[in-house]
Image (cartoon, grey):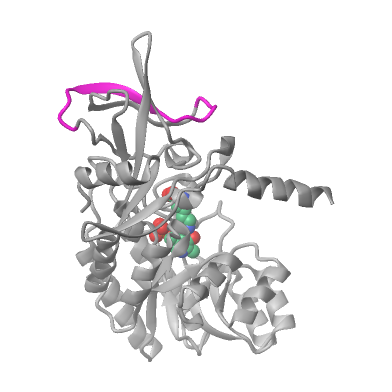
Amino acid sequence: MISNELLVSLAGKYGTPLFVYDGDTMLDRYNAIKEAIRHPGLRIQYAMKANYSVGLIKLLRAAGSGIDAVSPNEVDFALRLGFPSDRIVYTANNMGDAEFERVFETGVLMNIGSLSRLRKTAERHPGMRLCLRFNPDVVDGDSEHTMTAGALTKFGIPMSDLPAALELVRKGHLHVVGLHEHTGSGIQHAGSVYLAMERLMSIATRENFPELEFLDFGGGFKVPYKPDDHALDLVSLGSEIVSRFTAFEKSYGRELKILFEPGKFLSAECGHLVAEVNTIKDNRGRLIAGCNSGFPQLIRPMLYGAYHRIDNISNPDGRPVVYDVCGNICESGDRFAEQREIPEIREGDLIAIRNAGAYCYSMGGVYNLREMPPEVVVRDGNAVAGRRRLERGELLDIICNESWEAQK
Ligand code: LLP
């Protein structure tokens, strides 16, 4: 846990806006999954897209995690950070040929999620080892944008296309060593996890796929964001998962590895975005607390209507006052919270936006030409790693160079 005092002192040292991550919280969540899913073949494949802060990922590597990668750069990044290629699974969607070949060369296992790509693979890489992603037709997640299965999704091979997939596998002499499904992010009901598992296990027969080494049930473990959100009962989820998977292994006739790809669960709660409120405005009774960050740095409220707790860490005991907490971007939707009760905010106070460790920095951008904030990773109360703030002009150097290239 990172105290408000520590956040204030780090903000004093590194300036604001600033992302602060608690490495201990991330490792705690990692170990909680390991404790809950007690299966000798458990492999945790961190979904790097949630947060690619080097300091955090190195902690996970040391703890034994693998990586779920979704772009060639994520693969290269994981390799550069020392993950062995056999601990990375590549699950991009709408993969182009050049991208496929680039990742294929690294030796990382490819997870194929369309008949089109499977057909090309069978033709061009006969005999290849691969994983197949199926659509489990279970619709769940914390926002319609983050549900990745069912009739409206672009992801995975529909189960009804299983015969066509098997035919391509046969024609290309492909070795299917893994099957994969991912239901969504922030799965609300444990029942959806079990149902999606059952659907995948139902097609994972010896007859269909005799060479299986693992089943991968994706990510999506729920994290509480709102005050009344209940936390995931990881222990009962874990024991149910293990008993269902063990029963499956018996019918398959062999022990297999069981993979999960958590992103949010590992990283969300370890992150805090610290910003300074520099302007209090009273728009005819509606109080606006304007701060020096904005939606390009934390887009979840604007994109998904997501709730992030916001604390006034300079005046935690102030009287409760209702604010719209806004950023410094030239758009009306640039709001972190609407009509939120927060201890009184004075100009110069620091606020901490909580649960800012997953899909915040990693979804960031430089809209309005405001550079992304630096990041600090804390362990045991000390800053141990990070990424510095860009100097004035550094961002412009990159942009000017790009424009010059485009004109050539
Ligand atoms: N595996 C696959 C194939 C995925 O597509 C994802 C997330 C994960 C694992 C990790 O899911 P997680 O454990 O983090 O829920 N930007 C959204 C979340 C998008 C998730 C995309 N895929 C958000 O901020 O809520």
Please say if 120 is above or below 32: below
| 110 in the magenta segment | no
Taking the spot 50% from the left edge, 25% from the top edge, the residue there is: 332
163 with respect to 59 (left or right)? right
Q: Residue furthest right?
A: 408
User: Foreground residue, 293 or 36?
Assistant: 293
Number of on-image labels: 0
Residue 348, position as x, y percentages in the image: 31, 27
Measured as percent of width and height from the top left, residue 155 is found at 56, 60
Between residue 177 and residue 306, name the one nearer to us. Answer: 306
The extreme top residue here reads: 284
Q: Position of residue 192 (x, y in %)?
A: 36, 59
Q: Is residue 182 visible?
A: no
Give me the residue at 55% from left, 71% from top. Answer: 75
| Residue 184 image position (x, y, % from top left) | 44, 56
The residue lying at 42 percent from left, 59 percent from top is 53
The quarter of the rendering in which ligand 1 is drawn is bottom left
Is residue 22 visible to the viewer in this orientation of the structure?
A: yes
> Going 22% across and 51% down the picture, which residue do you hit?
2
What range is drawn magenta here? 316-332
Q: Is residue 33 above or below residue 105?
A: above
The answer to whether residue 4 is above or below residue 219 is above
Q: Quadrant of residue 308?
A: top left
Is 330 magenta? The answer is yes
User: Which residue is at the far left?
Assistant: 317
Is residue 388 or residue 43 the one in the foreground? 388
Q: Is residue 106 placed above or below 210 in the rendered structure?
A: above
Position of residue 307 in the picture relative to residue 102 (left or right) = left
